[in-house]
Image (tube, grey):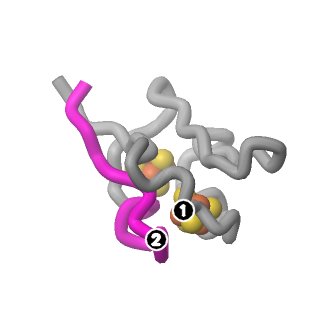
């Protein structure tokens, strides 16, 4: 079991599309903002669970979860 970042389903509609999480993630091509859905998608295969996106999201849309 390990930690990865996931979008909190209860808050994902609050995403303001600032893309701070995308710019902050140290792992390439892990976090993407889908403009048409106004939503962030995180690749669990690439995420290292560092938690940077969790602390930097101004809305609190992202959380760490055990998988
Ligand atoms: S930092 Fe938060 S509000 Fe900004 S794009 Fe990422 S998930 Fe959305
Ligand atoms: S937890 Fe770290 S590696 Fe995973 S998506 Fe967030 S910033 Fe990227």
Q: CA distance from mark 2 to mark 1?
A: 7 Å
Frontmost residue, 66 versus 46: 66
Q: What segment is highlighted magenta in the picture?
A: 52-67
Q: Is mark 1 within 8 Å of ligand 1?
A: yes
As displayed, is residue 43 above or below residue 21? above
Residue 27 lies, in percent from the top left, at: 55, 46
In terms of sequence position, does the residue under pointer 2 or pointer 1 come before the other? 1
Q: Is residue 17 above or below residue 39?
A: below
Question: Which disc is residue 14 wearing?
Answer: 1
Is residue 57 found inside the magenta-colored segment of the image? Answer: yes
Q: Is mark 2 within 8 Å of ligand 1?
A: yes
Task: Name the mark on residue 59.
Answer: 2
* Rendered location of residue 34, percent (x, y): 75, 44
* Residue drawn at the location 64% of the way across and 48% of the way down: 39
- Tag nearer the camera, 2 or 1: 1
- Split into quadrants, the picture shows ligand 1 in the one at bottom right
* Residue pictured at 34% horizontal, 45% vertical: 49
Would you say residue 39 is visible in this rendering?
Answer: yes
Q: Is residue 3 left or right of residue 51?
A: left
- Helix or strand or loop: what does disc 1 sit on? helix
């Amino acid at each position: 079991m390990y930690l990865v970042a996931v979008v909190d389903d209860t808050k994902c509609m609050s995403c303001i599309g600032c893309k701070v999480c995308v710019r902050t993630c140290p792992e390439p091509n892990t976090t993407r903002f889908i403009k048409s859905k106004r939503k962030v998608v995180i690749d669990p295969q690439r995420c290292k669970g560092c938690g940077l996106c969790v602390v930097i999201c101004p809305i609190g849309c992202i959380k760490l979860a055990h998988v």
